[in-house]
Image: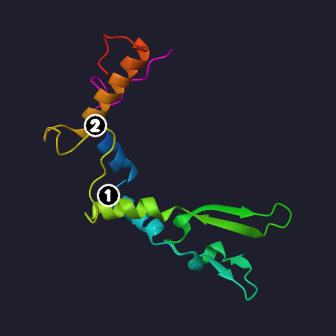
Amino acid sequence: MTSLPRHRYAAGAPALEDDEARAVRLGITAERVLREYARIAFSDMSRIVEWDAAGKMRAKPSTGLSEDDAPAIAEIVASASTGTVYRIKLHDKKPVLQVLARYLRMLPPLKTGSYDEEQADENEDPREFLIREVDRLAAEEAAGPGDPAVER
């Protein structure tokens, strides 16, 4: 049985500043992330495809798509024999809209696992909680069932 790897923010791992520097180097900014979310959240299939009078779908040329429409496309499926596009799938809007709504404080923050922001120490980093939980679960896994030495 293998043990779970330690989280990269655990003791001895690179500092958070390394991640921030990497994000700057890659051009990842909060504004850019929000823009990508908005492109998915407010996508509209009618800007990507057209339907004829018979209800047959026809994809608009990729050169005709705006910078906001192209990133919203998750999948394009075409016939192998004719090359005719018969399915276009957009990214799921619901989780993206939820993220944006939470960011804008239109919805309460998510409470995942047993981490409760109201009961947590106000100075505790949620990542530290997750590290402890992963370590606890790894210890339980390594100890096996019924080991009283591991707190459950």
Q: Vertically, is 32 above or below 12?
A: below
Q: Residue at x 62, y 75 (%)?
A: 63
Amino acid at dot 1? Ala
Name the quadrant containing residue 120. Answer: top left
Q: Residues within 10 Å of mark 1 (few under 14, many from 20)?
A: few
Q: Please provide percent x and percent y for residue 124.
A: 18, 37
- Seen at 69% across and 82% down, the residue is 51
Q: Main secondary structure of the magenta part?
A: loop
Q: Secondary structure at mark 1?
A: helix
Q: Can you give x and y, in whole percent of width and height, for residue 36 in the image?
A: 43, 63
Whether residue 32 is visible, yes or no, is no
The image position of residue 38, as x and y in percent, is 41, 67
Segment colored magenta: 1-18
130 drawn magenta: no
Which tag, 2 or 1, sits closer to the chain's start? 1
Q: Which residue is mark 2?
A: 127
Question: Helix, strand, or loop for circle 2?
Answer: helix
Residue that badge 1 annotates = 30
Q: Image point 55% across, 68% down: which residue? A: 70
Callout 2 crowding tier (Cα within 10 Å): few <14, some 14–19, many ≥20: few
In this view, the residue in front, 14 or 130, is 130
* Residue 30 position (above or below residue 12): below
Of all residues shown, which one is farthest toward the right? 81
